[in-house]
Image (cartoon, grey):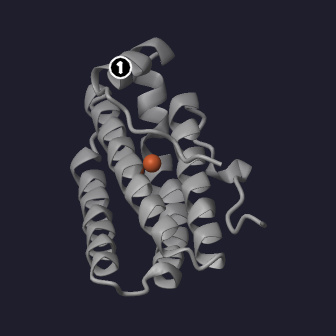
Amino acid sequence: MADILKWTADLSIGIELIDDQHRRIVEFINRLNEARETADKKAVGDVLAGLSDYTLSHFGFEEAAMKAARFAGLAQHRRGHERFARQLAEFGHRYALGEEVDAELLDTLNKWLLNHIKREDHEYMDVVKAALSPQQLAQILADLAPWPAAASG
Ligand SMILES: [Fe+2]
Ligand SMILES: [Fe+2]
């Protein structure tokens, strides 16, 4: 099945660990689209739960990295993450009540993710890259373990 979201170079922020996480979130969105196309309600719920877990962990990692790098825009960036986390929780709630949320969810994910990575995440990249080595970033990630499973398939 065709992926609805393609990884493109303008999504890269040049920090390997974070690009990798963003790629996995893109994968989750594509898996969600597949579940929707096959009208598999259980799969939609499973992918939504996995995506929510993974995204929240990713937010936690970005915030820890921004904090370690003393990035001045951390509080504002965190508010954006929190708003999106509330939206995800709301979708999960509606799904649990039996509502068909997948089309709206995919639309929201697509728009939000692309905008957030291209704008907000690009704002911290220079500061984080200058302040932290790949080893330091890997240590920050290790300190946040356990990390949820990536999208399968
Ligand atoms: Fe991000
Ligand atoms: Fe972010």
Instruction: List x then y, in percent, for residue 58.
Output: 39, 43
Q: Nearer the viewer, residue 14 or 91?
A: 91
Query: Which residue is painted at 55% across and 56% down in the image?
Result: 28
Q: Nearer the viewer, residue 121 or 72?
A: 121
Position of residue 59 in the picture relative to residue 105 (left or right): left
Instruction: List x then y, in percent, for residue 41.
Output: 48, 75
- The picture quadrant where one finds residue 2 is bottom right
Q: Nearer the viewer, residue 8 or 43?
A: 43
Image position of 27 with respect to 96: above or below? above
Query: Which residue is painted at 25% across and 55% down in the image?
Result: 76
Residue pushed farthest top?
A: 135
Residue identifier under label 1? 142
Position of residue 64 in the picture relative to residue 126 (left or right): left
Q: Which quadrant holds the N terminus?
A: bottom right
Query: Which residue is painted at 63% across and 62% down in the image?
Result: 30
Q: Residues within 10 Å of mark 1 (few under 14, many from 20)?
A: few
Q: Nearer the viewer, residue 75 or 52?
A: 52
Image position of 17 with respect to 136: above or below? below
Instruction: List x then y, in percent, for residue 47.
Output: 48, 60
Residue pushed farthest bottom?
A: 99
- The picture quadrant where one finds residue 141 is top left
Q: Secondary structure at mark 1?
A: helix
Which amino acid lies under the numbered mark 1 shown in the image of this protein? Answer: Ala
How many discs mark residues in the rendered view?
1
